[in-house]
């Protein structure tokens, strides 16, 4: 299936987890791919080979999405290689796992800059690379609206992402570019290994799911794919939750 033949997708934080699953889903649908990563060089290189095996062009770029110069250089490389971005998937995330009462200003800046400011920076620096009928899709989490232990500043940054998505949707509408957000439930990825209450979170997801299996990165990637389809044209400025029903029964 090559419904997206000729399209170019930039996925940040693409080497692992949801980012990796999204790369493969969009490549399978015909997209040429820009793999952005920060430190996972080996994983990014392996993923690039998989994309090439699917017959797609791929550009792998190491860049910090929270640094303006780094993002500017990434967009320059994309301009030289592809000259366009049809799907911009802002997936890269980071943060500090501590109680809010132990946090400092540097932790606040770290979470907000990497998780929220990065989305705005990516859109600004992409500029005219973003094509009409294009899509900007950000990743959020249930921590944007729920109190999760040790997740205070990351949760606040994800709430900021969802708010920013609404504003960017309004501002990019005249260019016929849709901006939406996908909020993911608890998935056993590398990122969650750093949570001190990892097992508790995973068990809570399992106990309150409406499905007979665990949530996996491909479930989120499938929703990102759906938002990229022409049939999703009228979905604008929304946050779509993919959590197997956890948020309605948990």
Image (tube, helix red, strand yellow):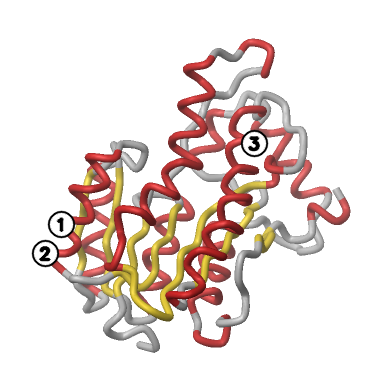
**Front of the two marks 2 and 3:** 2
Q: In the picture provided, is 167 more to the left or to the right than 19?
A: right
Along the viewing direction, whichever of 64 and 220 lies nearer the viewer = 64
Give above or below for 1 relative to 181: below
Counting the numbered discs, the total is 3
The x and y percentages for residue 192 are: 56, 37
Measured from the top left, where is residue 86 in percent x and y?
A: 35, 73
Question: Cα distance, mark 2 to mark 1?
Answer: 5 Å
**Disc on the earlier residue, 3 or 1:** 1
Q: Do labels 2 and 1 touch, CB within 8 Å?
A: yes
Identify residue for label 3: 155
Q: Earlier in the sequence, mark 2 or mark 3?
A: 2
What residue appears at the point 63 percent right and 10 percent down from the top-left corner? Answer: 102
236 is higher (above) or lower (below) than 230: above
Secondary structure state at the residue bearing disc 3: helix
Residue found 54% across the figure and 74% down from its top:
227
**Badge 2 element:** helix
Q: Is residue 116 left or right of residue 55?
A: right
Q: Residue furthest left?
A: 80
**Quadrant of res 165:** bottom right
Q: Which residue is mark 2?
A: 80
Q: Tell me: residue 210, above or below residue 45.
A: below
Dots 2 and 3: beta carbons under 8 Å?
no
163 sits to left or right of 189: right
Q: Residue furthest right?
A: 249
| Disc 1 crowd, CA 10 A, few/some/many (<14, 14-19, 20+) | some
Residue ID for mark 1: 77
| Identity of the residue drawn at 22% across and 73% down | 53
* Residue 208 coordinates in the image, percent (x, y): 83, 51
As measured in the structure, the alpha-carbon distance from the residue carrying label 3 to the one carrying label 1 is 32 Å
């Amino acid at each position: 299936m090559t419904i997206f033949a000729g399209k170019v997708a930039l996925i940040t934080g693409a080497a692992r987890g949801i980012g990796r699953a999204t790369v493969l889903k969009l490549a399978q649908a015909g997209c040429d791919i820009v793999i952005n990563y920060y430190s996972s060089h080996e994983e990014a290189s392996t993923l690039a080979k998989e994309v090439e095996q699917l017959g797609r062009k791929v550009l792998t770029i190491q860049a910090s999405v929270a640094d303006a110069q780094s993002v500017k250089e990434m967009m320059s490389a994309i301009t030289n290689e592809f000259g366009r971005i049809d799907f911009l998937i802002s997936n890269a995330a980071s943060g500090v796992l501590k109680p809010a009462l132990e946090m400092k200003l540097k932790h606040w800046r770290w979470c907000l800059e990497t998780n929220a400011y990065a989305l705005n920076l990516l859109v600004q620096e992409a500029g005219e690379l973003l094509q009409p009928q294009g899509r900007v899709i950000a990743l959020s989490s249930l921590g944007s609206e729920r109190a999760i232990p040790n997740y205070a500043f990351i949760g606040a940054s994800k709430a900021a992402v969802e708010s920013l998505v609404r504003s960017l949707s309004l501002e990019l509408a005249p260019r016929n570019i849709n901006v939406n957000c996908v909020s993911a439930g608890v998935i056993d990825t590398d990122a969650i290994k750093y949570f001190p209450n990892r097992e508790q979170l995973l068990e809570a997801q399992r106990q309150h799911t409406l499905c007979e299996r665990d949530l996996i990165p491909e479930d989120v990637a499938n929703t990102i794919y759906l938002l990229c389809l022409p049939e999703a044209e009228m979905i604008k400025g929304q946050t779509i939750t993919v959590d197997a029903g956890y948020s309605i029964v948990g």
